[in-house]
Image (cartoon, rainbow, N blue to C red):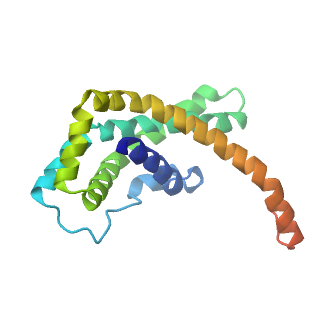
Amino acid sequence: MMRPILIIAAIAWLAAAHSVSAGLADAAKSPVASAPADIKPADPRAAAAVDKLLSVTGVANQMNALGPQIIDALLPALVRANVGKEQEIEAILREQFLSIFAGLTPDLVAHARSVYLAHFSADELEAIIAFYESPVGLKMTSETPAITREMFAYGQQAGRAAVAGAMPRIIDRMRAANLAVPAGT
């Protein structure tokens, strides 16, 4: 229910905020997103409930599990440019990216906490917790990593297909408008 949305949002957040071209080292220096400024102090019951929800759903572990998935997504493109160097590239990605990702997890969790507090009352949070503690909720929790991997892989394929389909038309329209088209596009 809510967790897949949170995880997909985290992937999008990471993809937008930490592009490889921006340099992973820069990403480790500061969090890119902060809690919304207009959030009122949480009522203690709601704060306790959201903390329990994040614990019950294993959000921190899910965030940490995304790192290897993102590395697996980046690896093929980097290997294509460095044939025969897959192990070396993978070692570099894992060494650099996973430590940075682990450092971002507390910020992601804190942000998730703020977002949940902004959208749900204590009663609603307790109802969500009851769901996640139910048999179906426990299954949801155990199946979410596999669902996320499958959706992430599909999202990549769909994104590539969308770019491949749109780019020729975009380039044609840019040329028709006498706009510069970057080399290699």
Residue, x 29% and y 29% (percent of image)? Answer: 138
Residue furthest to the left in view is: 44
Q: Which part of the image, by quadrant, shows the C terminus? A: bottom right
- Residue 180 is left or right of residue 8, and the answer is right
- Residue 72 is left or right of residue 67, and the answer is right
Please say whether residue 61 is visible from this viewpoint.
Answer: yes
Please say whether residue 100 is visible from this viewpoint.
Answer: no
Q: Quadrant of residue 79?
A: top right
Where residue 25 appears, x then y in whole percent?
Answer: 47, 51
Q: Nearer the viewer, residue 104 or 138?
A: 138
Q: Nearer the viewer, residue 181 or 9?
A: 9
Residue, x 72% and y 30% (percent of image)? Answer: 83
Residue, x 31% and y 40% (percent of image)? Answer: 60
- Residue 73 is left or right of residue 136, and the answer is right
Q: How many marks?
A: 0
Q: Is residue 143 above or below residue 174?
A: above
- Residue 89 is left or right of residue 67, and the answer is right
Residue, x 43% and y 48% (percent of image)? Answer: 10
Q: Quadrant of residue 55?
A: top left
Where residue 43 appears, x then y in whole percent?
Answer: 13, 60
Where residue 106 appears, x then y in whole percent?
Answer: 30, 48
Where residue 169 appears, x then y in whole percent?
Answer: 82, 58
Q: Is residue 113 above or below residue 3?
A: below
Q: Is residue 103 above or below residue 115?
A: above
